[in-house]
Image: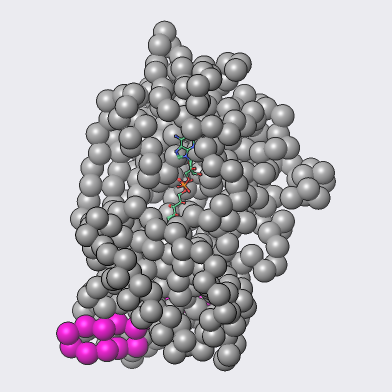
Amino acid sequence: MNSFDVTVIGGSLSGSYLALLLSQSGYRVLLVEKEHLPRRKACGEGMAEVAKRYLQKIGIWNALPADSYSPYYGYDLYLETAQGSRAISLRKPQSTRPEGYRVSRSILDEKVFKRTLFTPTIERKEACARSLQFENGEWVVDCGGETATSKYVVTAAGATALPLLKRSLQVSEKVRGKDNRFGVVYWLSGKWTNGTPDTVIARSNGRCQTLLTAINDNLLNVSLLINKSDSSFTEKEKSELFEQSLAFASSHGFELDTVLEQRGAARIESRKILTKHSHLYLIGDSAEVFDPIGGLGMVHAFESAELAAESLHLALSGTVSPYLAASAYRWRRNFFAMRVRFLTSLSYTLNVDMPPLLVSLIQFAPGLSAKLFSFLRKKLLRSRRSKKMYLLPERSECRESL
Ligand SMILES: Cc1cc2nc3c(=O)[nH]c(=O)nc-3n(C[C@H](O)[C@H](O)[C@H](O)COP(=O)(O)OP(=O)(O)OC[C@H]3O[C@@H](n4cnc5c(N)ncnc54)[C@H](O)[C@@H]3O)c2cc1C
């Protein structure tokens, strides 16, 4: 394989998005993805509204099929605590900007990955990157037997990046609290007898959080975030919780037709990987995994890719030293992640351990609370960069083939 400016390991949202941004500035990028897309990924499929602008930037938003996403306007929360059951609505009116979109990840990931096809400076390789070594100022990456060399490496390999990095380099990890949970996602086909809900419906009890996300009128994503590690989790318990979530969906008017697929995610945790290498960038879940209860993993994947693209551009063009560019990236990503962490904790509080005083306040002014929550998310996740940066030309042949 030839030599590249940047090798990107992982071609899901963060990896493909970064490759597209770098190709804009004419850099030669190798994009390594081990799976054949489309594939289903364990994900709650709720995308915050702010993420739409990244997809617009690369010309994907308008290319998404109408039945692959739908807007939602807030959350209907059902909390079962020792004090009893409470129903709380954090819903905005439909006349306002949606809170986010329920979007099929299999379609979204495939579209973003496919977009790299139309970019001559991106070479794609379907292989599993096994190891990387930094020798004489350049990286040598083992891509399933073949080797590639590049000036920089970006890992966008999701939560599985750690073993790859640990095999090859000295990295450390920092694990935060609220661990020991396990995610299982089911995709169900069926119909809503009372109309498709315009919110994400969530239920929480001591054992598990259940999220019902209606992608369209006939496809429902049911995500279970279970308070147990996967090793201590039996099939019997899983089917019991699944039966309960079906009953919960049915109580909201969902009539099940078929269980299409089920995917388990590894242990759910809040974790980040630390490295100070000046020629190595970690983006998306490779850099930091957030508790999915916040539904902000996709926004972080896009934003970290954009920040990395800016730093890489500065380093590759010789504007600043590689050390300075990498340090700036780490600092800026950390600053963004801090805000994501705060919002994730807030979602956790709302979904799992809401204090009675907050329950009373929200019940007293539900509309205002929903607007406030939405405003906070929008403000904290807003990116302040120039909108003109990295605008990909919308080539007609790409749009047609997408
Ligand atoms: C149960 C669950 C529910 C979630 N719900 C939501 C939600 O509702 N909203 C939200 O915004 N986020 C959610 N998230 C988080 C979100 O899915 C992730 O934050 C997001 O997918 C991260 O994108 P990424 O590109 O960094 O990594 P990933 O999407 O994980 O992609 C990594 C890619 O790298 C590839 N890869 C891995 N190793 C290698 C290798 N060695 N060589 C080559 N390729 C490799 C993989 O095949 C994969 O395609 C959820 C996560 C979980 C676990």
Name the residue located 40 percent from the left edge and 11 percent from the top edge: 135
Q: Is residue 29 visible?
A: yes
Which residue range is magenta in the image?
A: 73-87
Judged left or right of residue 108, residue 200 is: left
Judged left or right of residue 97, residue 349 is: left
Name the residue located 22 percent from the left edge and 75 percent from the top edge: 206
The rendered magenta stretch, by its main secondary structure, is classed as strand
| x, y percent for residue 85 | 27, 89
Q: Quadrant of residue 274?
A: top left
Q: Is residue 93 visible?
A: no
Name the residue located 67 percent from the left edge and 69 percent from the top edge: 67
Q: Reply above or below: 347 against 77.
A: above
Relative to the observer, which residue lies in front, 276 or 141? 141
| x, y percent for residue 252 | 47, 88
Q: Reply above or below: 42 against 153.
A: below
Q: Quadrant of residue 363?
A: bottom left
Q: Reply above or below: 231 against 1.
A: below
